[in-house]
Image (cartoon, grey):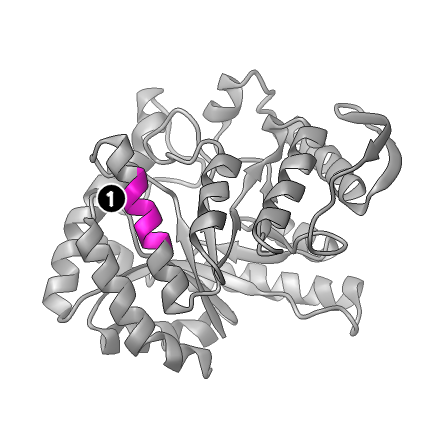
Amino acid sequence: MEVGIFDHVDRSGAPLGKFYDDRFAFVEACDAAGFYSYHIAEHHFTPLGMAASPGVFLSAVAQRTKRLRFGPMVYCLPLYHPLRLAEEICMLDQMSGGRLDLGVGRGISPLESRSYGENPDLAVSRKVYEETLDILLKAMAGGKFSHEGEYRSAREVEMVLSPAQTPHPPLWMGVQSVENAEFAARRGMNILSLLSSPVYRERVDKFRAVWKETQGAEAPKPKVGVGLFIVVADTDAAAKEIATRAYKAWHASFHYLYHLHGRAPVWGERPAEFQLVENEARGVAGSPDTVRRFIEKRVPEADIDYVTGQFMFGDMTRAETLRSVELFGRDVLPALRAI
């Protein structure tokens, strides 16, 4: 099993220049520790996401790392011109020597989509998403192509840029619903979710069944992952103190835009305290041994083969985060890889 990182790139309270410096120090530490991939969220007009232009942020990641894979989780496709995005993807994949993991989706927040002038209606945004994805895949295949859709079109375009990975970087999708799990399987995508084990297991079972039906025995095995809040310190008490404090800041950022507009998040309010996150088995704070045992239990519950840790969130300091990554990489990661 591989272990990666998921990062909202949420605001810490530090000045933005220092904030980005701290994030890149974190990414460099993850690269050195041997993590598999670094996945970042795309959000707009909210402190939940300071990587509003994932391509800009990830181009810096590409230059600061050597082995770590990376990518958006996800590019919000309705917000992009598909041809412009296709060229950006090709550049990122080439600049990193073929280390891009390409997460794509509709975007979870209708408030963010509306700010860009996009129709947040589910049926419309899903259609725009699928048409944009179709054009992306054709563009990355190279050569001259056309695509005529209801909302997105490309006419007699000849691509000059190409990705380093062929036919394109691995596709990823964030999964919330059973329908999304089925769509991802039919499209040959890896999946990642922040759901609890019992809820996610239903999605995983559907994904695996549809994958077997549509992709065939010769297809590469997909990664089926879950994201967890993870804080590691020398003792359980020290880790819980950090997580309890930092989660409150993350929680405020997560709800900021929704509460500003008098709305609830699409998938409901998140637990207000980190202890409740642990109670739902969606995060863990503790010593290396505590964290290892927690994750080893979670793997069979959700039938997953990939875990991502949200190691830096809220107002966690650079020192706290780097120590967490150091301990995890040294004392937890080797054991999980053996699963």
- Residue located 36% across and 56% down the image: 28
Locate residue 152: give its quadrant. Answer: top right
Eyeballing the image, is 230 above or below 127? below
Residue in front for this viewpoint, 239 or 156: 156
Eyeballing the image, is 18 above or below 150? below
Q: Position of residue 87 (x, y in %)?
A: 68, 36
- Residue located 30% across and 75% down the image: 330
Locate residue 3: give its quadrant. Answer: bottom left
All told, the count of numbered labels is: 1
Q: Position of residue 289 (x, y in %)?
A: 24, 78
Q: Residues within 10 Å of mark 1 (few under 14, many from 20)?
A: many
> SS of the residue at dot 1?
loop
Please name the residue that numbered disc 1 is placed on: 314
Q: Is residue 151 left or right of residue 332?
A: right
Residue in front for this viewpoint, 59 or 227: 59
Look at the image and tell me whether residue 184 can be seen.
yes
Eyeballing the image, is 42 above or below 260? below
Q: Position of residue 232 (x, y in %)?
A: 23, 65
Q: Is residue 149 left or right of residue 267?
A: right
Locate residue 147: give its quadrant. Answer: top right
Q: Which three-letter amino acid code belongs to the residue tagged 1?
A: Gly
Q: Position of residue 66 (x, y in %)?
A: 48, 59
- Residue located 53% across and 19% down the image: 116
Eyeballing the image, is 26 above or below 306? above
Magenta highlight: main SS: helix
Q: Is 215 included in the stretch rendered in magenta? A: no
Look at the image and tell me whether residue 273 can be seen.
no
Residue in front for this viewpoint, 62 or 47: 62
Q: Is residue 114 left or right of residue 180?
A: left
Magenta-highlighted residues: 20-27
